[in-house]
Amino acid sequence: MLLLLLALCSGIATADSLQIQPAESARAEIETAAFPVHDAEHYTVKCLGITCGHLILSSSIVDFEGRPAYHIVMTGRNSKFFNRIYKINIRIDSWVDARTQSSLVYESVTTEKGETSTERHEINWDEGTVRSVEDGVEKTLEFSSAEPVLDPLAFIFRLQALAKVGGGEITLTLLTTRGPVQTIATVHEPKTKRTSRGRRLLLEIKPQPADGKMFSKKGQFSLWVDPQDSTTLYILDFKLPFGHLISRID
C-alpha cells in the first residue's frame, strides 16, 4: 500500500449498515490504553522528498452489535500531482472487540482509476473463521489461534499502544489472507527525531513474523511513537522494492 502500505491494506466500508453508535457506557467499561483513541490525524506521505499522498487516521470507542469495540479508520489518497498519473482513494475500517482485543470486522473500499473494489472480512476468533466478501464473491477461511488475531490496521494501532520502553519485544498475531501469522516486533532504544511538532524522543518499532521472513523480499516497515504519548503515531517508514516512503504526522 502507498497509503498505509498497499501491500497490507486496501479499501473502505460504511458503518451505517452496522448500526454503530458512540457509547459512553462502552467507554467506561474498557481500558482505552489497549488501543490509542484519538480524533483524526493527518499524515503527509513522501518519496524521495516529493509529496505523493496523504493519510488520515482516527480511532474511537463504539457499541458494536451490543459489545464495546474500538473503531479504527484510515483514509488515503494520492497527491494532486500523482492523481494526474494514477488516481487512487482508499478507506479502511477496522472494529476490534474491546474485551478480547481480537478483530471483529475489517472493511475496505479502494477506488483506482475510477473503478471501485470492496472487501469485508467478518472475523470470529472463538469459532476460528473468517467470512470474506470481495467484490461480491464470498468465501470462508478457517484458522486456529490461541491468541487474539488482529487485522493489519488494528495491528499497527496495538503495537503503538504497547511500546512503552526501548529494548523490548512485542508479540502479536497478525491475521492475513493465508491465516494467522505470529509476529515479534522489536522496540529499539529511543532516538531524537525531527517532527512537525518539534524534536521528540521517539521509539522505533520494527515488526517481523516469528520466523523472521516477513518482508524479506517485499521490503520492511517500521513505526515511530512517543512512549510518553501513546495516542500519537509520528512516523510510518516503508522501505519497499520501488522506493522509500515516509509518512509523517502534520
Image: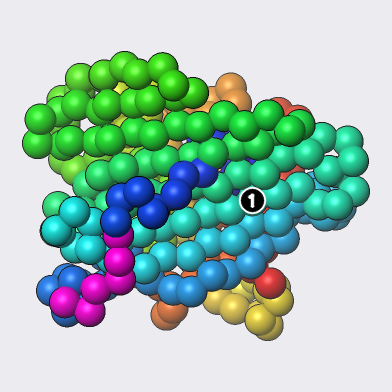
Which residue carries the number 1 mark? 76
Towards the viewer: 53 or 180: 53
Residue displayed at 36% across by 68% down: 60
Q: Residues within 10 Å of mark 1 (few under 14, many from 20)?
A: many
- Magenta stretch? 20-25
Quarter where residue 239 is shown: top right
Q: Residue at x 16, y 36 (%)?
A: 125
Q: Give how far across and how far down residue 236 sits, in percent.
A: 59, 54
Quarter of the N terminus within the rendering: top right
Expressed as whole percent of the image width and height from the top left, the position of residue 12 reads 51, 43
Q: Taking 230 as reference, is 167 above or below it? A: above
Q: Is residue 164 magenta?
A: no
Q: Report the side of 209 relative to 143 (left or right).
A: right
Q: Nearer the viewer, residue 188 or 11?
A: 11
- Horizontal relation, residue 245 to residue 175: left or right: right
Report whether residue 29 is seen. yes
The amino acid type found where label 1 is placed reads Gly
Q: Position of residue 148 (x, y in %)?
A: 19, 43
In the picture, measured across the screen, residue 56 lies left or right of residue 232, that is right
For image coordinates 64% across by 57% down, the residue present is 55
Residue 197: x and y in percent read 66, 81
**Is residue 99 shown above or below 130?**
below
Q: How is the image coloured?
A: rainbow
Q: Is residue 22 magenta?
A: yes
Query: Could you tell me how many numbered marks the image carries?
Result: 1
Q: Secondary structure at mark 1?
A: strand
Q: Is residue 73 above or below residue 124?
A: below
Q: Quadrant of residue 247?
A: bottom right
Residue at 39% from the left image edge and 53% from the top image edge = 15
> Closer to the camera, 168 or 38?
38
Question: What quarter of the picture does the C terminus occupy?
Answer: bottom right
